[in-house]
Image (cartoon, helix red, strand yellow):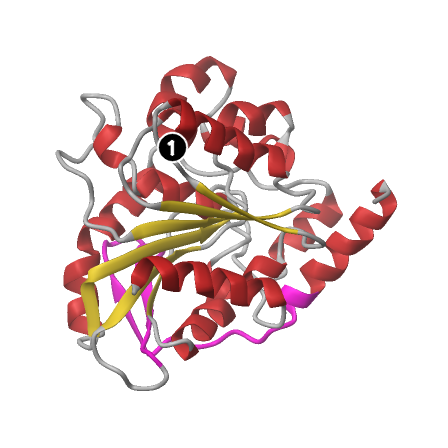
Amino acid sequence: MSDSAARDRDVAETESVFAHPEVAPDRSAAYGDHPDQVVDFYAPRDGRTGAPLVVLLHGGAWRAPYDRAHVSPLADFLARRGFAVASVEYRRGGDDIPQQRDGAESARASGAAPVAGRWPETFDDVAAAMDAMPVLAARELPGADVRRIVVTGHSAGGHLALWAAARHVLPEGSPWRLPAPPPLRGVVALAPIADFTVAAELGVCGGAVAQLLRGEAEFEDRAAQADPGVLLPTGIATTIVQGVEDIVVPQAVSEAYVDAAARSGEMVGLTLLGGVGHFPLIDPAADACAVVAEEITQLAW
């Protein structure tokens, strides 16, 4: 595919995913005092009890213009597939920019994208949300089975999903380290920023990785606590779903993580979808979204 055709595909896919109206949650609950420390809960649409819980972490290069609103149609899609869903918000970079659904496009148009992520707050929040999740979900979605949790996330959220499952292999002394593996059925990471070295080399999302870690001077030390590509093996079932035509987070980033896992003695699944770019993975109108639901089902049930 030519560069211009790939860009045209990306534009069309982006427009499609953001054309869906926001879906309001059934319940919301705070896991901290900051306005972004909140989880939206979606109950299984068929009313079933004992449904597995899908923890959903949104993407957007860890930048404030993208919030959880843009994955609310995906949360609803998964709820209609019989899952209980918890969509997590967390602190991101550029809080001075209004957190609107069209904010990212405005930033691109102005040429001034906000800084990616907040160190350490982005990681503080994901760790706190995951630690609070069993209690919050049991209270807000009493029909959910919190013994069967699958974490999924898209793009930067895919990175956070992989990271959340790797906290027990963080370096000693890390404030986010767990003494034992988290009780997860597995991880389904969607076009994740899964390997920081390769992502930085490719300039993924306008150098978002270096911004998240706050520059080259901090890269090595902080990557040891934040890069899923070095936090291996996890011992937790993990699958990556990746569009072959993705020009936002290219296939090479996912492949680097899968290769690193193999070197550590762990097998990570990699589902490659031909003719698919970055956003169909979270677009309920796209066939790729059904593939994502099936991958989650295989781990959850």
As displayed, is residue 25 above or below residue 296? below
* Residue drawn at 38 percent across, 32 percent down: 119
Question: Residue 261 appears at what percent x and percent y?
Answer: 40, 29
Q: Is residue 203 left or right of residue 211?
A: right
As displayed, is residue 224 above or below residue 56? above
Does the magenta-highlighted stretch encompass residue 21? yes
Tell me the quarter of the image containing the N terminus: top right
Question: Residue 248 appears at what percent x and percent y?
Answer: 65, 43
Q: Which residues are magenta?
A: 16-44
Can residue 175 be seen by looking at this rendering? yes
Q: Residue 214 or 138: which is nearer the viewer?
A: 138
Q: Is residue 283 left or right of residue 89?
A: right
Q: Is residue 51 left or right of residue 97?
A: left
Can residue 176 be seen by looking at this rendering? no
Q: Which image quarter: residue 28?
A: bottom left
Q: Residue 271 or 26: which is nearer the viewer?
A: 271
As displayed, is residue 111 above or below residue 171? below
Alpha-carbon neighbours of circle 1 within 10 Å: few (<14), some, or many (≥20)?
some
What residue did someone put label 1 on? Answer: 119
Q: Residue furthest top?
A: 217
* Residue drawn at 21 percent across, 33 percent down: 168
Badge 1 marks a residue whose secondary structure is: loop
Tell me the quarter of the image containing the C terminus: bottom left
Q: Residue 281 or 125: which is nearer the viewer?
A: 281
Question: Residue 217 appears at what percent x and percent y?
Answer: 47, 13
Question: Residue 157 appears at what percent x and percent y?
Answer: 45, 48
* Residue drawn at 31 percent across, 61 percent down: 300
Q: Which image quarter: residue 267?
A: top left
